[in-house]
């Protein structure tokens, strides 16, 4: 348990590390030049409302449960259990995708002929290294995430600035006309949900409110992180597209390929490629540490209420960390890594299918969070709100619907990326649909279990 209370800067860095994901930067660049228009549009119509709503909820309802607490207050325990289940288990499903990307980049940098079996061993080792870090101390976990947040800023800044320098000397790799930069579904539509995914997670810092100096500073924390994150995503995407033709942007190899173009084959270039490649790999670990810390806290809080199995609530007597939830996350990640490795045909295909599956699960709690915000505004207006989203109730309804629809379309496009063109690739869609369905079914089983355990004793009725 941490002894020191944290101020704006460390919490903003924690939030930045959670949200800023270098691993999917290549997915946004794969859309092409129109990704810049999409970034701008999503920032205006979604991220700003999302940040305002998160700030109000975090300041009005502080506590380690975060999104779990908000949904429970608004809709009762049943929806809270669903929310926590998706929010927590998605980390165990997402971790394999991140560490498969880690292993692929590691192989490309140092061992081009590294076998799939060796890469799987790396993934499993990283999984349990993450669990260990999250188990030993909140202080150490926050220190690692803050350090990795700085490294992410360095990597993306180098990609952005390097892209501009390269383009000034060699010309741009893609055509940056206003028409091309305008949002368009013509190219890379499958990767559009990744833009939404890349900007989710600012509410995760709400699980750290117990360790904050002043919860009234939450809006400053959230919007400082939002501002830096948005700028870096745009700069990083632009840098990749200035140096690399869009058709050459690989999901796994894109960052390393860009570094090779920017720095060349000379001794200095090789040094920079290896140095920045290693830094990028370290940021992947930091991302998983921050998400495991936050989501496991929310799951443990739910388990303490009897809504998830008791083992999830197990807490370290020495460190106060949610060891039960962390270990289960590691077991899920390991199982998924081993299972998917049996069906791997290429790193890019494996990474994206796992990423799309885990992202669908990850986004589902937000389908509950935004309606919960509106519900609490209406039925719990008496609660003091240190920060309040400006505007009338009609404005709040509009913001809620807008945010809800953005999340919904992202879920649909992750599962059915070609639906906007009237086609469905069932070979891609069916495994993801089955995986999501199984995840939902397990959540419903846990909900039924909670009802059966609580109703007879009269302790807590699950709404």
Image (cartoon, grey):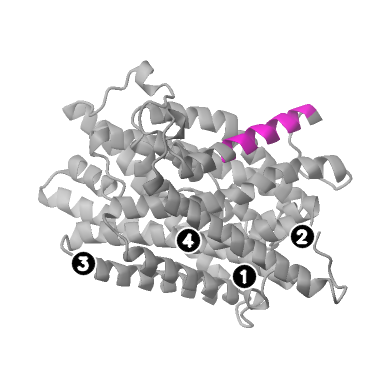
> Magenta stretch: residue 406 in it?
yes
Residue denoted by label 2: 77
Question: x, y percentage for residue 256?
Answer: 24, 49
Q: Badge 3, how many Cα within 10 Å: few under 14, some, many 20+? A: few
Q: Residue lying farthest bottom?
A: 317
Q: Which residues are magenta?
A: 394-407
Q: Residue at x 76, y 53 (%)?
A: 61
The circle drawn on residue 93 is 4
Q: Residues within 10 Å of mark 2 (few under 14, many from 20)?
A: many
Q: Residue 218 vs residue 357: left or right?
A: right
- Mark 1 and mark 2: Cα distance apart in space: 29 Å
Would you say 15 lies left or right of 367 here? left
Q: Choose the circle earlier in sequence order: 3 or 1.
A: 1
Q: Tag 2 or tag 3, which sits nearer the N-term?
A: 2
Q: Earlier in the sequence, mark 1 or mark 2?
A: 1
Measure how far apart labels 3 and 4 are at the Cα level. Answer: 23 Å
The number of discs equals 4
**In the picture, which quadrant includes the N terminus?**
bottom right
- Residue designated by label 1: 2
Decide whether the magenta segment is chiefly helix, strand or loop. helix
Query: Of circles 3 and 1, which is in front?
Result: 3
Query: Decide: marks 3, 4 in contact (CB < 8 A)?
Result: no
């Amino acid at each position: 348990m941490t002894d020191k209370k944290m101020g704006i800067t460390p919490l903003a860095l924690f939030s930045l590390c959670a949200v800023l994901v270098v691993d999917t930067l290549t997915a946004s660049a794969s859309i092409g030049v129109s990704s810049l228009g999409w970034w701008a549009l999503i920032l205006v119509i979604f991220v700003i409302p999302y940040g305002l709503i998160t700030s109000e909820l975090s300041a009005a309802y502080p506590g380690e449960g975060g999104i779990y607490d908000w949904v429970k207050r608004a809709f009762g325990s049943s929806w809270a259990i669903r929310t926590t289940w998706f929010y927590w288990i998605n980390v165990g499903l997402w971790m394999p995708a991140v560490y498969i990307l880690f292993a692929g980049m590691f192989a490309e940098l140092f061992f081009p002929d590294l076998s799939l079996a060796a890469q799987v061993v790396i993934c499993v080792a990283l999984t349990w290294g993450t669990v260990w870090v999250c188990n030993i101390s909140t202080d150490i976990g926050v220190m690692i995430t803050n350090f990795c947040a700085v490294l992410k800023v360095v990597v993306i800044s180098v990609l952005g600035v390097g892209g501009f320098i390269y383009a000034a000397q060699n010309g741009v790799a893609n055509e940056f006309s206003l028409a091309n930069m305008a949002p368009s579904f013509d190219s890379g539509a499958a990767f559009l949900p990744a833009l939404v995914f890349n900007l989710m997670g600012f509410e995760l810092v709400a699980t750290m409110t117990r360790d904050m100096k002043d919860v009234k500073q939450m809006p400053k924390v959230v919007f400082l992180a939002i501002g830096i994150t948005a700028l870096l995503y745009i700069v990083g995407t632009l840098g990749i597209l200035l140096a690399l033709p869009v058709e050459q942007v690989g999901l796994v190899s894109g960052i390393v390929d860009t570094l090779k173009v920017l720095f060349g084959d000379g001794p200095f270039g090789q040094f920079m490629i290896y140095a920045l490649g290693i830094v990028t790999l370290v940021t992947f670990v930091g991302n998983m540490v921050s998400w495991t810390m936050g989501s496991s806290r929310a799951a443990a809080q739910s388990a303490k209420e009897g809504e998830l199995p008791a083992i999830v609530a197990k807490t370290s007597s020495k460190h106060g960390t949610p060891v039960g939830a962390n270990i289960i996350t590691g077991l899920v990640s390991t199982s998924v890594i081993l299972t998917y490795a049996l069906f791997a045909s290429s790193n890019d295909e494996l990474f994206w299918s796992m990423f799309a599956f885990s992202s669908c699960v990850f986004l589902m709690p937000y389908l509950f969070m935004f309606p919960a915000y509106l519900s609490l505004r209406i039925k719990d207006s008496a609660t003091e709100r240190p920060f309040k989203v400006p505007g009338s109730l009609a404005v709040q309804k509009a913001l809620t619907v807008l945010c809800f629809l953005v999340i919904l379309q992202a879920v649909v496009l992750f599962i059915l990326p070609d639906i906007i063109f009237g086609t469905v690739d069932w070979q891609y869609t069916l495994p993801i649909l089955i995986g999501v369905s199984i995840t939902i079914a397990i959540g419903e089983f846990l909900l039924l279990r909670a009802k059966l355990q609580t109703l007879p004793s009269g302790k807590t009725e699950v709404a």
